[in-house]
Image: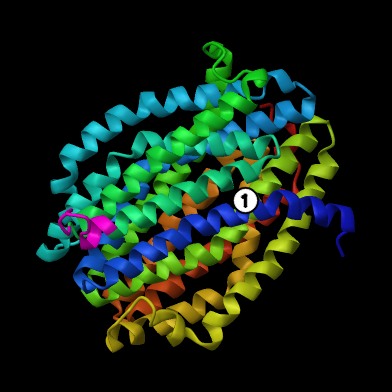
């Protein structure tokens, strides 16, 4: 059993992070529900475009892990006047990496999208959506850098509050631009992409305003970070960024595999991915809380306490995610019917949804310990484990089960989920060791 004060600490840090994660993906579900009215092809296009965009921004998601690990370590060491310096570095890297990424992928998008799915209708709807989302890539990088800072100084509620503004703007903008209103023509999937990009920039503006008021005394925007700070940022962030990129590329490859089975399966999987992200992200949010608690404990020189925080958060996440998965086990059709409007799509999605829900507690172990290890600076070990299991086990088995053996969508998702269960077991083994306790950040 957890001690009451430790459970309160996990709740105080974890609940705003979980709320932020849920709000972000509930917004994705709202967008998915809106686009679903346009038909399966549009839904498949947005699903593929979203994960192509996820692959594009994955390098920037890694900045959050690097910023949070460095900020939490300095917070634990009592170097409060330097906690915002890693944030400055993260914002600089967002611009330096974002501009060439945006330029290159925007031009290459018409050639890239057909590689994922050959359906001409899906390509026609998905390419402009992907290009519109790409325009927000710099803002996405800055958003994740700010998230790492607020989490690292135990103020995750700030990021959550900014997300509420961002998502409220996104819902309004997406509705107006998708369906047309106030003299604006209906833009369909393109409107969904534009709405998301504009809302992200609005959120970044709010982050800057709050950081100027609350983080200037901690070094925010007070000069360019020293070269050693930037090198540490790159060393800590790069493996996490590559891990995110290859994970996103793996999801895109998974959609390619599913596309070999059929467009209905792609549309169903678009909904499944968004649903399991909503279900999984409480685990990610609690994992981010673990990352801060672990980093701060290591900064105090208390490695045993850091290890204990990891296991304590795993317990909370396992219970939480199991409870979240129960409705999908019991009434999957009710959940799916809110997003899929054809009986055939619901039929192929029902089995995979139940299988994913059954393994929620196992996913909690992997999600929390991934972030706990990142908080300790062990990004390279996390990258090796996750990339190996996804690309050398999960994806080959998914192709074997789906297109080759003809086991359909259920076979693909069984292979994918099984690989993630093995990954969780290996991460638990790493956490039980002590190599991560000796990493300098």
Residue that protrudes farthest toward the left in the picture: 120
Residue at image mark 1: 17
**Residue nearest the observer in this picture, 51 or 125:** 125
Nearest the viewer among 85 and 166 is 166
> Looking at the picture, how far across and down is residue 367, in whole percent?
60, 56
76 to 269, vertically: above or below: above
In the image, the segment drawn in magenta is: 176-186
Residue closer to the observer: 129 or 55: 129
Residue 404 in sight here: yes
User: In this picture, is 349 found above or below 13?
Assistant: below
Q: Position of residue 33 (x, y in %)?
A: 34, 70
Q: Is residue 183 magenta?
A: yes
Residue with the most extreme front position? 182
- Residue 421: % across, % down: 57, 66
- The residue lying at 54 percent from left, 17 percent from top is 221
Q: How is the image coloured?
A: rainbow
Up/down of 356 relative to 54, above or below: below
* Residue 98: % across, % down: 34, 31
> For the stretch drawn in magenta, what is the main secondary structure?
loop
The residue positioned 62% from the left and 47% from the top of the image is 371
Using the rendered view, name the quadrant where residue 337 is placed: bottom left
């Amino acid at each position: 059993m957890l001690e009451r004060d430790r459970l309160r600490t996990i709740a105080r840090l974890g609940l705003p992070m979980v709320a932020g994660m849920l709000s972000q993906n509930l917004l994705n579900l709202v967008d998915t529900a809106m686009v679903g009215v346009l038909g399966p092809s549009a839904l498949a296009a947005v699903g593929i475009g979203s994960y192509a965009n996820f692959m594009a921004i994955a390098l920037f998601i890694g900045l959050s892990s690097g910023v949070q690990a460095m900020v939490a370590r300095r917070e634990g060491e009592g170097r409060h006047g330097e906690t915002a310096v890693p944030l400055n570095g993260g914002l600089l890297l967002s611009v330096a990496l974002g501009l060439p990424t945006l330029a290159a992928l925007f031009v290459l998008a018409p050639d890239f999208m057909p590689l994922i799915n050959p359906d001409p209708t899906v390509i026609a709807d998905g390419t402009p959506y992907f290009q519109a989302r790409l325009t927000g890539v710099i803002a996405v990088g800055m958003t994740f850098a700010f998230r790492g800072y607020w989490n690292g100084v135990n103020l995750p509620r700030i990021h959550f509050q900014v997300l509420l503004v961002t998502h409220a703007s996104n819902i309004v903008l997406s509705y107006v631009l998708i369906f047309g209103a106030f003299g604006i023509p209906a833009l369909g999937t393109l409107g969904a992409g534009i709405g998301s990009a504009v809302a992200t920039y609005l959120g970044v503006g709010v982050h800057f305003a709050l950081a100027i008021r609350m983080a200037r005394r901690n070094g925010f925007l007070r000069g360019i970070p020293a070269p050693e700070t930037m090198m540490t940022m790159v060393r800590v962030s790069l493996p996490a960024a590559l891990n995110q990129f290859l994970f996103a590329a793996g999801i895109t490859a998974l959609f390619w595999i599913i596309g070999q089975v059929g467009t209905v399966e792609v549309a169903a999987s678009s909904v499944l991915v968004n649903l399991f992200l909503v279900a999984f992200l409480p685990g990610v949010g609690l994992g981010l809380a673990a990352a801060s608690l672990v980093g701060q404990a290591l900064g105090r020189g208390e490695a045993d306490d850091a290890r204990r925080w990891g296991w304590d958060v795993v317990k909370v996440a396992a219970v939480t995610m199991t409870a979240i998965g129960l409705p999908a086990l019991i009434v999957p059709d009710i959940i799916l019917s809110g997003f899929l409007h054809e009986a055939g799509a619901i039929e192929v999605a029902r089995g995979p949804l139940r299988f994913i829900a059954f393994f929620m507690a196992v996913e909690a172990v992997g999600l929390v310990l991934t972030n706990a290890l990142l908080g300790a600076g062990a990004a390279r070990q996390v990258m090796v484990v996750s990339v190996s299991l996804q690309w050398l086990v999960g994806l080959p088995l998914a192709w074997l089960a789906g297109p080759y053996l003809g086991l359909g969508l259920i076979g693909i998702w069984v292979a994918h989920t099984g690989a993630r269960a093995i990954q969780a077991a290996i991460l638990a083994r790493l956490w039980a060791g002590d190599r991560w306790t000796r990493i300098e950040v």
